[in-house]
């Protein structure tokens, strides 16, 4: 079992719709979770992070976390063609010494069509 | 502050050659990470520095790979005797405690022929 799993997609949604991206993780001890957006040929760009169960909203983006189900999701409202990219879910793994590394899923490709 | 920078952005080399990449983190960040990303996959952790100390290395980092951060500022990643399987995007990220958020540089895309 992979540590962080995402549906590879592509997820195709019409412009203006809500895109829902999902991620599951295996380490029950994980405490912080990140969503990055990556355009083709570019590096990952941070969208949001979430630490607590429930929802966290930032503009058109909402991150949802359910630690009991080991599930993180990202909702994108009013999707735009410029949102077309690969969305990477990352889970923070704490290492000895109090520092951390990110474990990434393979990403979900989102395509927003006009 | 211009964010994390990496140099070069692209590198094409022949199998067996050595290559070196540089990363300059965000100036106040004392934590620096290297990741490798291949097509269709998420970034994979390679190594981590806190200031000048290399505190964690992935088993992905074979003995052909070496990383340094001599003065706790910029870092270099060297690959000796490159192989075609080393072709990937090499990403650098930095963060500063207590915040865990890592910010990525633009990456160095390596192609080994």
Image (cartoon, grey):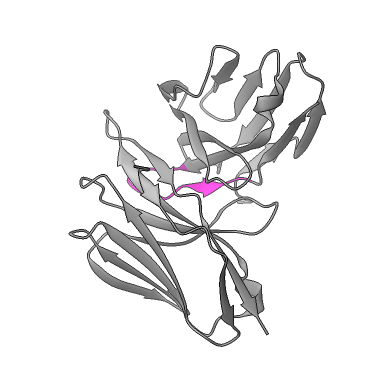
In the shown orientation, is residue B112 left or right of residue A88? right
Instruction: Quarter of the image for the C terminus of chain A: give it.
Output: bottom right
- Residue drawn at x 52%, y 21% is B61
* First to last magenta residue range: B95-105
**Residue furthest left in the image:** A68
> Which part of the image, by quadrant, shows the N terminus of chain A?
top left
- Picture coordinates of residue A112 (x, y %)? 62, 77
Residue closest to the eye, B54 or A72: A72
Is B4 placed above or below A81 here?
A: above
- For this orientation, the residue located farthest to the bottom is A16
* Vertical side of B16 occupied by B29: above or below: below
Relative depth, front residue between B101 and A87 = A87
Q: Main secondary structure of the magenta part?
A: loop
Q: Position of residue B34 (x, y in %)?
A: 53, 33
Front in this rendered view, residue B32 or A82: A82
Q: Compared with residue B46, is residue B104 higher up or lower down, i.e. above or below?
A: below
**Rendered residue at 64%/51% (across/down):** B2
**Residue B63, position in %: x, y?**
55, 11
Q: Does the magenta run of residues contain A17?
A: no
The quarter holding residue A79 reads bottom right
């Amino acid at each position: 079992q992979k540590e962080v799993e995402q549906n590879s997609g592509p997820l195709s949604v019409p412009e203006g719709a809500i895109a829902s991206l999902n991620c599951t993780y295996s380490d029950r001890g994980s405490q912080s979770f990140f969503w990055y957006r990556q355009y083709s040929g570019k590096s990952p760009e941070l969208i949001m992070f979430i630490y607590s169960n429930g929802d966290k909203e930032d503009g058109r983006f909402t991150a949802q976390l359910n630690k009991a189900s080991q599930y993180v999701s990202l909702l994108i409202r009013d999707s735009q063609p410029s949102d077309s990219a690969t969305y990477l879910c990352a889970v923070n793994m704490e290492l000895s010494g109090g520092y951390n590394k990110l474990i990434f899923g393979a990403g979900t490709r989102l395509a927003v069509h006009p | 502050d211009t964010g994390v920078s990496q140099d070069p952005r692209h590198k094409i080399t022949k199998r067996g050659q050595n290559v070196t990449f540089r990363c300059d983190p965000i100036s106040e960040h004392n934590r620096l990470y290297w990741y490798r990303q291949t097509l269709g996959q998420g970034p994979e952790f390679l190594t981590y520095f806190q200031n000048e100390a290399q505190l964690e290395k992935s088993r992905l980092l074979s003995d052909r790979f070496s990383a340094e951060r001599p003065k706790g500022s910029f870092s270099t990643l060297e690959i000796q005797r490159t192989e075609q399987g080393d072709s990937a995007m090499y990403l650098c990220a930095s963060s500063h405690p207590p915040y865990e958020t890592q910010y990525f540089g633009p990456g160095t895309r390596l192609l080994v022929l």
